[in-house]
């Protein structure tokens, strides 16, 4: 038998990894001859691996020293256990009194002292009712008690769900990373006190992220990862694309020995874009204005030209020297990647960038106002927002709108010290405007409704969630955060069809209703009034589940995540269903059919982070999570 | 009760269709014999997992009651020890998760940094030495793998069966556990050294003051 590491490791790093794994296994059981030979040979030439082995052995000795302090069980433990077994036998109603001794003088903590028979009977009735509503996950015959006709204390049945796979990145041994996809077909109802973990034993695929990322996004075709890297040192911030290695076909589990297989969901063939990168000059884009040298112009690559020599093989560096603002997203057809980013040196605010997927060229800034934020994709177009600056007086005393971007993105880089005795600039208030942008032609369609910030529209184009209100300049002088207003939900209008032929005067047809303009239709309902700085919202594909993450600082890594349920026909929020009122969550989350997934921040219950999944089937909700770990990134 | 093992790749698998007919007296006698032979090690395992002797005693009792209920699912007597560890392991994890779910409050939206740190938990539990504290800081399944393999001498297949995972997965968890323990021990040792240096500095300061 050969251990299955050989196929997965071809480089030096992988060899050390394999040596570490084989060392660990060798301490558990004998290695196959060829693996043992390989390990011996490797250890001979690898001082670091010998050190690892010595550390493992030392830790084992330390662990075994605990045997000297083996705890002694209480003397009455058998008496208590025997009494509980007899109580169990009586509860079964089979052979009551067969042993005749009854419970002995034992301590009966908690529920163990309760009358089992009546409780079990009542619970069985409840479970029968529950089972008629929720289909069971496993056939009853699969449980030993069930097949033997044994009465047990039943727990609430799992909630069976039909959900998209959840994907995440987790650290592997030796500083590398693994991409894991887990199928979630059942979640635990909240009334159950315990739940098995989300299966962390699903096959994982080793990926090279080049270091510890600050964010990871996977492409719709599952063939590449967008990695944001910020080491805080001399190395400039970088945004690069990492190929996900081709996968081996799933291995059918062998009856005796399972071989770890690499399984990534089947993806359609990658659609390479046939269109070129965005044109430098495009209708509807603002004319480039005078700005600092580091300022991107529309159609120019990101500042800090990527240096291909510093990029590992297979990586494509699409931007360098910029920090991503918010979250990047691929278009649904995987042809484009959009994001907003600002120079890492803090010289200006963010601009909108586009990268033609697969292109060896860098991402291109398609705005130069330094205050444009990517929000989401809507079909093949980009929804973005920018802060509309207040009118500023000119030398002549006439107010003028600052269409020409200032260096920092904010109206004045000079702090207004008069507003604050500490010298901190007074916050500036601005009104947001939003627009749709065609990535091919760069043609813009402005949303005429005022004060719409970061709108997100469901895939069906029916509902829109956005911040309705003003913006306030953040203390860093570069970003905008939420000002006065609230998060609202409204119906969405795609506007009049521009391709439609001019109709006869509509006034001749009294039944004809005018098509609302592009944007929210003006029937907004308030969803959240507590957002103070930043938010991110996503609809599920059905448009009836809406997840909203709210952070208290513009650059907050941790916020509160909630889920609301919408009526399919009216879009009204169902106040009777509160499946997730506000769980602590890291910034990125993923929503798909039947489930919402996020990463919990570390420190919850003293534990490290875990991937958490809220799953649903109609209005039944449940939860499942991975065992805690560190450095988790949700990608799907 | 026993759920089907996560994979069927390990050669020891429990929770399969009933392999022996239910006989109450036989079940009682079987569990009694099992208790006599293994209760000390099962209790020790649960103490080490939960770090609470009284709770471990309750859960040992639970584990043997569950073994009694599931008596007819054990195919071969020679697998009884691993089977019993599987039951105890599930009982321990259930208890640990129950604590987490109760304390974590993810649904109410009221927990804002109120959760205690791992260090605080370790202090509360009055863990005696760096090893206990390091073990307390690593994920539960990894801790279980280390304890079962190194202290309770389960073989690879027994470990997989006890943890309800495949043989390959059990070995992977154990490898991760060794790495986690190594890191946690290093952190503990660093912290101890720092505390010692602080004590020395304090002592030196006090000695200087007395002079």
Image (cartoon, rainbow, N blue to C red):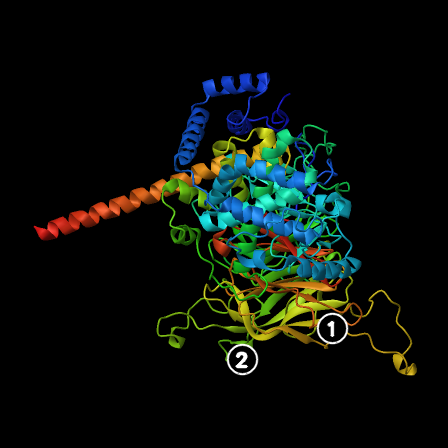
- Please give the residue where the numbered disc 1 appears in the rendered image: A572
A487 or A279, nearer to the observer: A487
- Which is nearer the eye, A360 or A62? A62
Give the distance between the C-alpha atoms of the residues marked 2 and 1, in whole angstroms: 46 Å
- Please give the label number shown on residue A398: 2
- Picture coordinates of residue B197, whole percent (x, y): 25, 44
Pick the front one: B178 or A437: B178
Task: Let me know if marks 2 and 1 both belong to one chain.
Answer: yes
The chain that hosts pointer 2 is A
Residue located at (74% from left, 32% from top): A252
Q: Quadrant of residue B190?
A: top left
Residue B14 visible at all = yes
Q: Locate residue A458, reporting x and y percent.
A: 73, 63
Which image quadrant is residue A391 in?
A: bottom right
Badge 2 vs badge 1, beta-carbon distance below 8 Å: no
Give the x, y percent position of residue B89: 57, 42
The disc, 2 or 1, on the residue closer to the chain's N-terminal end is 2
SS for dot 2: loop
Circle 1 marks a residue in which chain?
A
């Amino acid at each position: 038998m050969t251990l299955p590491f050989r196929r997965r490791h071809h480089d030096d790093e992988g060899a050390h990894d394999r040596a570490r794994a084989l060392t660990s296994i060798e301490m558990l059981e004998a290695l196959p001859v060829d693996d043992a030979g390989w390990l011996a040979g490797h250890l001979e030439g690898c001082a670091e691996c010998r050190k690892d082995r010595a550390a493992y052995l030392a830790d084992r000795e330390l662990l075994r020293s605990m045997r000297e302090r083996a705890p002694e069980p209480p003397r009455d433990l058998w008496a208590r256990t025997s009494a509980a077994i007899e109580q169990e036998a009586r509860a079964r109603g089979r052979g009551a009194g067969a042993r005749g001794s009854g419970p002995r003088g034992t301590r009966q903590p908690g529920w163990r002292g309760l009358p089992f028979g009546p409780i079990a009977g009542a619970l069985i009735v409840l479970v029968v009712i529950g089972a008629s509503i929720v289909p069971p996950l496993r056939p009853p015959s699969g449980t030993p008690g069930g097949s033997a006709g044994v009465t047990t204390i039943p727990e609430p049945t799992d909630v069976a769900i039909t959900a998209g796979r959840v994907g995440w990145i987790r650290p592997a041994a030796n500083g590398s990373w693994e991409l894991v996809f887990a199928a979630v077909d059942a979640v635990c109802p909240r009334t159950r006190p315990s739940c098995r973990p989300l299966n962390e034993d699903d096959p994982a695929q080793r990926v090279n992220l080049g270091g510890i990322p600050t964010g990871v996004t996977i492409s719709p075709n599952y063939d590449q990862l967008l990695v944001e890297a910020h080491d805080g040192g001399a190395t400039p911030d970088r945004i690069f694309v990492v190929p996900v290695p081709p996968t081996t076909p799933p291995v059918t589990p062998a009856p005796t020995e399972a071989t770890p297989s690499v399984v990534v969901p089947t993806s359609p063939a990658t659609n390479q874009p046939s269109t070129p990168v965005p044109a430098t000059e495009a209708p509807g884009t603002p004319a480039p204005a005078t700005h600092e040298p580091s300022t991107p112009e529309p159609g120019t690559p990101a500042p800090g030209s990527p240096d291909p020599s510093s990029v590992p093989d297979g990586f494509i560096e699409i931007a360098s020297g910029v920090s991503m603002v918010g979250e990047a997203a691929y278009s649904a057809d995987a042809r484009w990647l959009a994001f907003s980013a600002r120079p890492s040196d803090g010289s200006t605010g963010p601009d909108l960038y586009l990268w033609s997927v697969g292109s060896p060229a860098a991402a291109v800034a398609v705005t130069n106002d330094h205050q444009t934020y990517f929000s989401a994709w809507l079909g093949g177009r980009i929804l973005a927002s920018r802060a509309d600056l207040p009118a500023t007086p000119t030398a002549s005393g006439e107010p003028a709108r600052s269409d020409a971007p200032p260096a920092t993105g904010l109206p004045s880089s000079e702090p207004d010290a008069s507003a604050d005795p500490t010298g901190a600039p007074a916050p500036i208030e601005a009104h947001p405007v939003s627009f749709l942008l065609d990535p091919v032609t760069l043609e813009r369609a402005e949303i005429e409704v005022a004060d719409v910030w970061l709108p997100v529209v469901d895939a069906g184009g029916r509902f829109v969630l956005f911040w309705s209100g003003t913006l306030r300049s953040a203390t860093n002088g570069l970003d905008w955060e939420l000002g006065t207003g609230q998060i609202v939900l409204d119906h969405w209008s795609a506007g009049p069809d521009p391709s439609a032929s001019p109709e006869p005067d509509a006034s001749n047809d009294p039944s004809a209703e005018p098509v609302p303009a592009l944007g929210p239709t003006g029937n907004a309902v308030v969803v959240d009034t507590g957002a103070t700085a930043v938010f991110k919202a996503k609809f599920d594909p059905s448009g009836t589940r809406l997840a909203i993450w709210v952070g208290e600082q513009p650059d907050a890594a941790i916020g509160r995540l909630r889920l609301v349920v919408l009526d399919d026909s009216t879009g009204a929020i169902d106040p009777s269903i509160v499946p997730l009122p506000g769980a602590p969550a890291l910034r990125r989350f993923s929503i798909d059919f039947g489930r919402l997934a996020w990463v919990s921040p570390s420190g919850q219950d003293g534990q490290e982070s875990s991937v958490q999944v809220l799953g649903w089937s109609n209005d039944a909700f449940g939860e499942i999570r991975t065992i805690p770990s560190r450095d988790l990134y949700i990608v799907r | 009760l026993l759920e089907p093992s996560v994979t069927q790749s390990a050669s020891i698998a429990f929770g399969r269709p009933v392999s022996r007919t239910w006989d109450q007296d036989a079940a009682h006698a079987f569990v009694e014999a099992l208790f006599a032979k293994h209760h000390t090690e099962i209790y020790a395992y649960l103490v080490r997992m939960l770090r609470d002797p009284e709770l471990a005693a309750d859960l040992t009792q639970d584990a043997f009651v569950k073994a009694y209920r599931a008596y007819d699912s054990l195919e071969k007597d020679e697998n009884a020890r691993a089977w019993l560890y599987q039951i105890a392991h599930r009982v321990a994890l259930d208890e640990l998760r129950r604590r987490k779910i109760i304390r974590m409050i993810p649904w109410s939206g009221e927990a804002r940094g109120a959760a205690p740190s791992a260090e605080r938990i370790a202090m509360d539990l009055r863990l005696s030495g760096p090893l206990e504290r390091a073990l307390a800081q690593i994920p539960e399944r990894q801790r279980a793998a280390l304890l079962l393999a190194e202290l309770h001498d389960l073989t690879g297949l027994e470990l997989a069966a006890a943890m309800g995972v495949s043989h390959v997965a059990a070995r992977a968890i154990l490898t991760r556990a060794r790495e986690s323990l190594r890191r946690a021990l290093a952190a503990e040792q660093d912290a101890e050294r720092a505390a010692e240096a602080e004590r020395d500095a304090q002592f030196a300061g006090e000695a200087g003051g007395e002079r």
